[in-house]
Amino acid sequence: MKGLASIYGYGAYIPIYRIETKEIARVHTKGGEKAPVKTKSLPGPDEDSLTIAYEAAKNALKRAGIDPSLIEALYIGSESPPYAVKPSATVIAEALGFSRKLYGIDMEFACKAGTTAVISVAALVSAGVIKYGVGIGTDTAQGRPGDELEYTAAAGAAAYVLGPLSRDSVATIEHVYSYVTDTPDFWRREGEKFPMHTFRFTGDPAYFHHIESAARGLMEETGLKPSDFNYVVFHQPNVKFPQRMAQMLGFTEEQLRLGLLSGEIGNTYAAASLIGLANVLDHAKPGERILVVSFGSGAGSDALSIVVEEGIEARRKLAPKVSHYLSRKKLVDYAYYLKYRRYIHGVT
């Protein structure tokens, strides 16, 4: 059996609160009802990227069925940690009862930090440094009021428990490929509350060039082609970019459908492609192959080829599916949105 590591458990979490695009447009512009992203998720007043990561990790552990004390690595990818100086990894590890002999770290590479966390933990497993570890992508993304990002910047988390290669696992990461360049399409300086971006430059040459390069690089190294994959998941800052990317690479709408969730929940940044993968795993059958390609501004992409294993059938029913979080939602107006995102100074 070939591969880097196996996925023993996976879990997602999406906050219950949503705001409709047309509600944001009512305040700032017109035409929000025509936007492909209809609603976006937002954290409640008692939620942040750490708490939602905890919820996702708890779901992943339920599916894995592994004693938490056996977890010896926790890598968290996020660009919205609640502390500027203090790791989220130690809080989550303590709360879930992970081993004190722990390789724990908070990572940042914009929206690809989650897949990089998963690959890093898988590499520790493959090298024999640890037996089990957890990789998480989590974000409560920020968008300046009135900016384009405000229509899509959302909240969500996904976690993956990784371990030695096994047919009894959920899936196997069979190959990975990463591609990066210095492309400054999006950034936030120290002390600034909101990020800056270069508008359409974020699409081309940033998003499209990096995802295409990573996907083609993986397929060249493995000898695989688009028809060898049953599903494909791309980073999803909106709906149109992944759809165009699929056409560029030769994937069909059906291969893309299950992994494209941004129309319902917005762009969950470091969690986006990993939540899409979780939704695919909620439906996939043993033997099917999945291509996941993330994108992080600055800029880079991770590509992962994943094969579904026999253990998926029994394990996926042990924790809430992504559809559970998609179906439970509470709409709020723009005033509550500002309050929940703490954009109104002096309101807690």
Image (cartoon, rainbow, N blue to C red):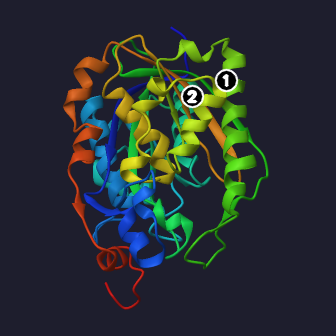
- Identify the mark at residue 51; answer none if there is no mark: none
Residue 281, image quadrant: top left
Mark 1–mark 2 contact, CB under 8 Å?
A: yes
Measuring from the top left, give residue 238's x and y in whole percent.
51, 50
> Can residue 100 be seen in this snapshot?
no
Quarter in which the C terminus is drawn: bottom left
Residue 155, image quadrant: bottom left
Residue under the point 47% across and 63% down: 151
Q: Toward the viewer: 125 or 138?
A: 138
Image check: 213 left or right of 34? right
> Can residue 310 be seen in this snapshot?
yes
Measuring from the top left, give residue 263's x and y in whole percent.
41, 48
**Residue topped by disc 2:** 304
Q: Toward the viewer: 189 or 212?
A: 212
Measuring from the top left, give residue 189's x and y in whole percent.
66, 73
Q: Toward the viewer: 172 or 323?
A: 323
Image check: 130 left or right of 178? left
Q: What amino acid is labelled 2 in the image?
A: Leu
101 up-or-down from 233: above or below: below
**Residue topped by disc 1:** 218
Q: Toward the viewer: 15 or 203?
A: 203
Image check: 181 left or right of 64? right
Dot 1: within a 10 Å radius of its alpha carbon, few (fewer than 14), some, or many (20 or more) residues?
Answer: many
Residue under the point 29% across and 40% down: 322
140 up-or-down from 117: above or below: below
Q: CA distance from mark 1 to mark 2?
A: 8 Å
Residue under the point 67% across and 23% down: 218
Query: Which of marks 2 and 1 precedes in the sequence?
Result: 1
81 up-or-down from 220: above or below: below
